[in-house]
Amino acid sequence: MKGGAPGRTPAPRRTGGGSGNGPAVRPHSPGVSRSWPITLAILFSTLLIWYLVYTAEIVRSREADAETFTRIYAQVQAGLTSPDRGAELAALTRLQILLVELGVPFVVTTEPAGDYYTSVNLPFEVANPPTPEEVERILAYARDLDARNAPVGDSSSQLVHYGVTPQAARLRWMPVLWATGLILTILLATTFFRYQKRNAAERAWTAMARELAHQLGTPISSLQGWVELLGLRPGERPEGMRRVEIAEAIGQDLERLERVSRRFELIGREPELTRVSLGEVVAELRSYMEVRLPRLGPGIALHVDVAPGLPDVRGNRVLLAWALENVVKNALDAMAGTGGSISISAKPADGRWVRVRIRDTGPGVSTEIRDTLFDPGVTTKSGGWGVGLALTRRIVEGMHGGRVELLDGTGRGVTFQASLPRAR
């Protein structure tokens, strides 16, 4: 006969990252997703450091220019107040030297012919005196300077063609480079977040498909066994089972199939929310689990504490039962073979919320997966799909506007808390 024993279904596989101290198992390697934030942080930090260093260099350059301008003023003042013609000429010579020290490129031509006379601070090397080829290059450079800055002087005698200092030239590119770096960082960040979102969706759908196949496989396998029993003669059936008993068992498996299909149908769309008695949901969960504890969790005790007059919540009864059941089954998986207890409590809180806490005495949650515990594909069991707690979060937070969180778990035992809005 195919499947397990008639009318009895095997323990459900752990479906989410609940308690436990095993290694986290993911359907993909997290290395790529972890390296992206580091890369973006390094890129942004590099841009910021470059910006700060370059800005500091500009400030130092401006401070040096201020000192040079002050010295120029002092030389002009000395020349103006000196009655000695030789001292005045010496002051002008020193003034010219100070102007050259500013780093501004100058090309002096004699007019109106435009012949080369002298030059300083050129961006290229020339001989002293320059060769005829170098003179042609200098004059071409002077024409380029005139395209940006009009020459200064007497057009009948001399003109001074000038440019900008190297610091100012670099400063022109600073906004372009800074904007390019920021745009590149934004594009990389956008690409990363889109990748993360798409990858998370793929993990969720993959895990959901596997979980659906698993939950459907158990009752289908059981139904195959019952069909084989029906094909046997009454005397060949184990323990002389009658058709009516087999029909009842088939009805139970069909009911389970319907419940599974109904759950996955609701999780795929926006469910209708009505007034739901959370106390009744917890009571049904208790009845459902107590008859299965000898098989699913031998040696585990279940304790339920529902506050009297617990307010109704606004929700979907089927989905809320599924959400709480996932957490309890994760606790059972965590304590498999060790025994212990699971406590379920429900009470009103903060005026507009009803809170349910599920605590187990299992081994706790490893620190490596605490931050990703509710993500699809995260599980502490090598055979799990990592769906249970991800579904619980989607149901509680995405569909009911509540909140589910891990209150503790670093030591012995784990406490999960689900906060649901009261029905108005």
Image: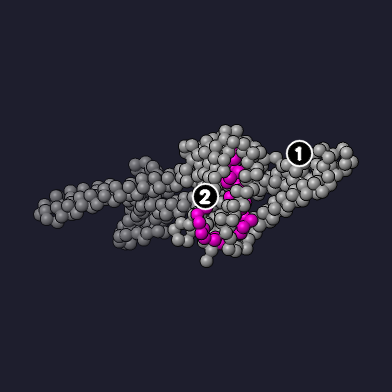
x%, y% of residue 171? 38, 52
Question: What is the number of the mark on residue 5?
Answer: 1
| Nearer mark to the viewer, of 2 and 1 | 2
Callout 2, which amino acid?
A: Asp
x%, y% of residue 74? 17, 52
x%, y% of residue 237? 84, 39
Q: Evaluate whether residue 76 shows in this view.
A: yes
> Image point 57% across, 43% down: which residue?
302
**Residue tagged 2:** 305
First to last magenta residue range: 305-333
Front one among 73 and 133: 73
> Image point 67% across, 53% down: which residue?
264
- Report if residue 317 lies within the magenta region: yes
CB under 8 Å between callouts 2 and 1?
no
Mark 2: which secondary structure?
A: strand
Residue furthest out toward the top: 337
Above or below: residue 195 compared with residue 413: below
Query: Which label's residue is closer to the chain start, 2 or 1?
Result: 1
Above or below: residue 65 compared with residue 271: above
Front one among 17 and 331: 331
x%, y% of residue 144? 42, 55
Where, quadrant-wise, is the N terminus in this rendering? top right
Residue 335, picture quadrant = top right
Above or below: residue 367 compared with residue 391: above
Q: Residues within 10 Å of mark 1 (few under 14, many from 20)?
A: few
Mark 2 vs mark 1, CA separation in Å: 34 Å
Q: Evaluate whether residue 93 shows in this view.
A: no
Residue 10, picture quadrant = top right
